[in-house]
Image (spheres, rainbow, N blue to C red):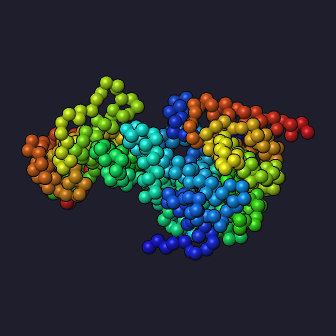
Amino acid sequence: MIKPSPATKLADMQRNFISDCLSGKLTKDNTLMVDDIDTRVISAQGLMGIYQNSAIANITHSLSLTYPVIEKLVGDDFFRATCRQFIREVWPTSANMDDYGEEFSAFLAEFEHVKHLAYLADVARLEWAFHQSSLADNANITDWSTLAQVTDILQLQFVLAPSHRLISSAYPVDEIWQVNQDNALADIEVDFSHQHDETNNSTFLALIRPELKTVIVPITLGEFEFLQCCENEETFEQAMISASSKQADFSVDDSLKKFIELAIIIGFKGND
Amino acid sequence: MEMIKGVGIGLRYQHFQEFIEHKPDVPWLEVHTENFLNKHSTSSKYLATIRQNYQISAHCVGMSLGSADVTCPVREQHLQKINKTLDWLQPSLVSDHLSWSACDGVHYLPDLLPIPYTEEAFDVVTQNINRSQDILQRQILVENPSSYLGFVDSTITEWDFLADVSQVTGCGLLLDVNNIFVSAHNHNFDAIAYLNSLPADAVKEIHLAGYSIDTIEGKEVYIDTHGQRVYGGVWQLYEQAIERFGAVPTLIEWDTDVPELSVLLEEKSKAEAIMAKVLNRQLIF
């Protein structure tokens, strides 16, 4: 249970300071710090405005590192204004700014000014997954020869790499992401010609960081289901049944080989 | 561990590849510890490679040494993460700021926020530094802040506060010459008197950076943006600092609008020339 700071003068001042910087309520007549600071040359609002601008710029910078594609899609000015609104609603809670910004996707989904860009929230979800993948622990890959010792292969559970992430979307978010990379070819276009049914996803992606950089791998619906089952620690048998129920031509041999080669599946937990 | 010497530069991700491929002639690098809290992250892997050829100073921004709540969970968790990073980074120096960022145990504002120089704040800061040094099992350096406002309750000067904090906790000092210059302008105090008030043997590292100038309600305010070359007045103050503190390892710091590495190397050469000039002069007299 987190306790608030004791009610000392310093604690009160710090609470007011953060509120003035992040609440969005700092005005000439509403500056919580007015009694604490020397305002003989510059007003309290003017002085706190310096810290407010700096704090918001720092947090926005952090968001721009996590969400570079969103920034590119909406433009610098709009991105900054959007972040400002987001920051008012979601204050950082960790000194590790890599932890900040998970709620950005949900915020965009509800943000009135981007309602017409229905894919934006899903692109943000992909970028958060990419960010998390790039920060994840290394994988300890199992010696696959030990698989031969498992007596009941159907009952084992496959283990996924710490850097793996799964994303599904009604939009071609991987293509949107790709064309907004610095090294993207200029003549690639994203195909928005077919109707997008928001209740029926058609893009399925696995993210994995094999060496230095995370890569995005398009997968099928069956493969997505299979990996989700693995995430949920379901048995190989359950995963196969679920995947086949979603995709009639799901090939467990091909998918398993592919995921082991990509080091998305890195091991197994046997029943022995 | 071998101590760092000479003029280093702040390592930024824009220059990772250049340091790996060309190994530019820089005696040491400073990194922001908070950018490498995950040992296996992409950034940490780059740093692990670069680190094989350079000594490192670990500069932290999140210890929040001025937080009123000395048992603040945000601080405690963060100290544990920093400790883990220092384990593999093995830096020669570790530093943070005379400032605060965390409050109420849950809120964190990623900036270096000012504290009033009062008895209460002194108590808090010394407790927090002691706690940090206990957890990290080493001396930390505390950097003088730049600030834009003064507190009506302050009863101690910043330089006396720092000198006393260093004496009570045994922490070293990281002297940011640009911060002194910026604050001296904003608060109208004598920068040389500031330098002369600090205990010479406590200063273990110096920072140099650029600032920007803003006008607020008709008053010119210097803002510590780390996005420009070092200003002439700061170079002059640096010469005074070397005169007083000797050949203290010095860092060229640049955080916003990070330029080509060659620009940082030019600034490094200027600092080296000033350091050499002062030390030669001291040898002659």
The quarter of the image holding the C terminus of chain A is bottom left
Given residues B106 and B6, the one toward you in this image is B106
Residue A220 in the image: above or below residue B155: above
Total label count? 0
**Furthest residue toward front:** A29
Farthest bottom residue? A7
Q: Residue at x 46, y 54 (%)?
A: A87
Q: Is residue B144 visible to the viewer in this orientation of the structure?
A: yes
- Residue lying at the far right of the rendered structure: B285
Left or right: A35 as drawn, with respect to A245: right
Res B28 visible: no
| Residue B189 picture location, percent across and down | 79, 53
**Along the line of sight, the residue nearer the viewer: A148 or B166:** B166
Which image quarter is the N terminus of chain A in?
bottom left
Q: Residue furthest top?
A: A187
Quadrant of residue B178 in the image? Answer: top right
User: Which residue corresponds to the image point at 71% horizontal and 70% vertical from the top-left?
Assistant: B119
Residue at x 34% of width, y 26% of height: A185
Up-down: is B79 above or below A145? below
Give residue B252's quadrant in the image: top right
| Position in image of residue A174 (x %, y %) | 29, 38
Percent coordinates x, y for residue A168 in the rendering: 24, 47
Residue at screen point 9% across, 41% down? A249
Q: Position of residue B75 (x, y in %)?
A: 54, 63
